[in-house]
């Protein structure tokens, strides 16, 4: 009872119009009060799919396919463990937003000084920029492969999707959820079809989900495993999840309503992240079935596109149609990810520096911050896609640096009885989260040292 009263005290003043996260869509979607399970779940389904696209964006593709090409199905267990960690952290993120009426950026800023908040904003902004690098490059290369549009032109076209987002926000947040869900369905169907054609080993796949000590003892396998784990949990998704979980209208003074919102948001998040797990598994299986033992280079999107139509590499199933489907999936992944990336940029800008400018200007600034370095790099290395795709490696380093600054506050806030009341992390959740956090930090530090050649 005491905790419940304390919770209400902590929620006072958190839902004022000036303080709402993504104010134009916050609490904009009605949810049924006394409906059945499936009707209620349908009302809460949507935010999870926007979160899930961050776990299957173009930045994950090369790592997953390379993992299959080099070690066949053995790294599927790493994909499984990464997905379980993601489910844990994203459920905590959604619960934080629903219970407190604040997103992670707002809470972090409120619990730090102005100077520290500004530093954290810079770090997080770099993470958003790094995330957008993979999405913009992936979309631009897909446009080049599909329509022969020069890379620079593709980057400019991709950056203009912020205008589409502005229109969609006017039409309602449900429209954004539906469009992203459609793009994710395209990705899932394309890779399911390509994996089916590749005739993978079912017994090899099942065995691959069982963790092996060989992953630790084999240096190359360990390094690629760390890449898969390190690239899976994205900092911007934790900020995004804590915000868009608030798009459903919930009475925070009603404990039962809060509990229901937390329950169904968690189910939605886990269902959609399971889809992301399936997609990442399909990517690795595709790499294993088509490229294992071929000694083919699959380190770039263009390499993968060309290999799928080369019978000397993938055998009888090779066809231009297979390559085109890959490019369509790449474009779908890039576009869905840029939509959520732009939303994350707005959340972070509003939460950390409390910027008060028109929404169209805010989104335009967010997009320009992300696209400018990619565009400059593309112009400088015009015609050299290999150099441009190398930006993906640098982007993962930035994400590795920024990750602790999102994960650590998330675990602290969701474990706080003062802030979360009865909805604070249970003991097993708290210890599991801290264990996952420490492991993620160690792995990402290891990756950074590897990238700069400081640890072999």
Image (cartoon, rainbow, N blue to C red):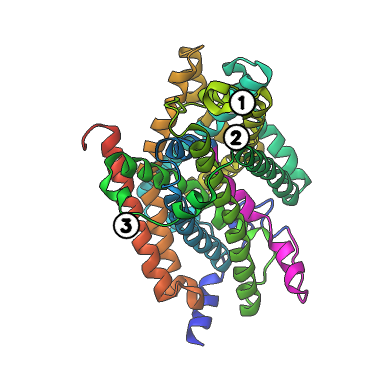
| Secondary structure found at label 3 | helix
Q: Residue at x 26, y 38 (%)?
A: 449
Estimate the x, y position of residue 13 in percent, counting from the top left. 57, 67
**Could you tell me how far apart the alpha carbons at marks 2 and 3 are, in whole angstroms?**
30 Å
Marks 1 and 2: CB-CB under 8 Å?
yes
Q: Is residue 105 visible?
A: yes
- Give the left or right position of residue 294, taking residue 259 as reference: left
Looking at marks 1 and 3 on the same chain, the residue that comes earlier in the sequence is marked by 1
Q: Residues within 10 Å of mark 1 (few under 14, many from 20)?
A: many
Q: Is residue 111 visible?
A: no
**Could you tell me how far apart the alpha carbons at marks 1 and 2 are, in whole angstroms?**
9 Å
Determine which of the numbered discs, if any, sits on residue 114 in the image. Answer: none
Question: Eyeballing the image, is 297 above or below 197?
Answer: above
- Give the left or right position of residue 448, taking residue 338 as reference: left
Estimate the x, y position of residue 205 in percent, counting from the top left. 50, 50
Q: Is residue 44 magenta?
A: yes
Q: Of residues 388 and 161, which is closer to you in this image? A: 388
| Secondary structure found at label 2 | helix
Q: Residues within 10 Å of mark 3 (few under 14, many from 20)?
A: some
Q: Residues within 10 Å of mark 2 (few under 14, many from 20)?
A: many
Q: Which residue is mark 3?
A: 438
Looking at marks 2 and 3 on the same chain, the residue that comes earlier in the sequence is marked by 2
Q: Residue at x 38, y 56 (%)?
A: 211
Q: Nearer the viewer, mark 1 or mark 3?
A: 1
| Secondary structure found at label 1 | helix
**Could you tell me how far apart the alpha carbons at marks 1 and 3 are, in whole angstroms?**
36 Å
Which span is picked out in magenta?
29-57
Looking at marks 1 and 2 on the same chain, the residue that comes earlier in the sequence is marked by 1
Q: Is residue 42 magenta?
A: yes
Q: Which residue is mark 2?
A: 334
């Amino acid at each position: 009872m005491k905790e419940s009263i304390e919770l209400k005290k902590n929620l006072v003043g958190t839902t004022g119009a000036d303080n709402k996260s993504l104010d134009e869509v916050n609490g904009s979607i009605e949810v049924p009060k006394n409906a059945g399970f499936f009707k209620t779940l349908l009302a809460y389904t949507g935010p999870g799919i926007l979160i899930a696209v961050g776990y299957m964006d173009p930045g994950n593709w090369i790592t997953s396919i390379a993992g299959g090409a080099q070690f066949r199905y053995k790294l599927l267990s790493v994909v499984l463990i990464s997905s379980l960690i993601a489910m844990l952290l994203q459920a905590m993120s959604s619960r934080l937003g629903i219970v407190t009426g604040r997103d992670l950026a707002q809470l972090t800023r409120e619990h730090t000084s102005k100077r520290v908040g500004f530093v954290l904003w810079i770090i997080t902004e770099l993470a958003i920029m790094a995330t957008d690098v993979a999405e913009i490059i992936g979309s631009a290369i897909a446009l080049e492969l599909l329509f022969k549009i020069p890379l620079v032109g593709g980057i400019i076209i991709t950056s203009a999707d912020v205008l589409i987002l502005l229109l969609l926000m006017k039409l309602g947040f449900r429209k954004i959820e539906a469009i992203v869900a459609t793009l994710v369905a395209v990705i899932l169907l394309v890779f399911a079809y390509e994996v089916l054609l590749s005739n993978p080993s079912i017994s090899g796949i099942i065995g691959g989900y069982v963790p092996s000590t060989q992953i630790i003892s084999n240096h190359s396998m360990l390094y690629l495993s760390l890449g898969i784990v390190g690239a899976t949990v994205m900092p911007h998704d934790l900020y995004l999840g804590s915000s868009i979980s608030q798009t459903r209208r919930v009475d925070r003074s009603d404990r039962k309503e809060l509990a229901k919102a937390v329950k169904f948001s968690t189910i939605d998040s886990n269902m959609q992240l399971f889809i992301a797990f399936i997609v990442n598994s399909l990517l690795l299986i595709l790499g294993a079935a088509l490229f294992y033992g071929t000694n083919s280079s699959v380190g770039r999107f263009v390499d993968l596109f060309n290999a799928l139509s080369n019978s000397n590499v993938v055998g009888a199933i090779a066809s231009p149609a297979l390559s085109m489907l890959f490019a369509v999936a790449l474009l779908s992944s890039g576009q869905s990810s840029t939509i959520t990336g732009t939303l994350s940029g707005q959340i972070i800008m509003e939460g950390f520096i409390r910027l008060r400018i028109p929404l169209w200007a805010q989104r335009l600034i967010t997009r320009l911050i992300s696209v400018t370095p990619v565009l400059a790099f593309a112009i400088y290395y015009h015609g050299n896609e290999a150099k441009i795709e190398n930006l993906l490696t640098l982007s993962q380093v930035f994400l590795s640096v920024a990750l602790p600054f999102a994960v650590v506050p998330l675990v602290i806030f969701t474990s706080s009885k003062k802030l979360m009341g009865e909805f604070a992390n249970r003991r097993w959740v708290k210890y599991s989260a801290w264990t996952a956090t420490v492991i993620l930090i160690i792995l990402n530090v290891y990756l950074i040292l590897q990238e700069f050649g400081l640890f072999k």
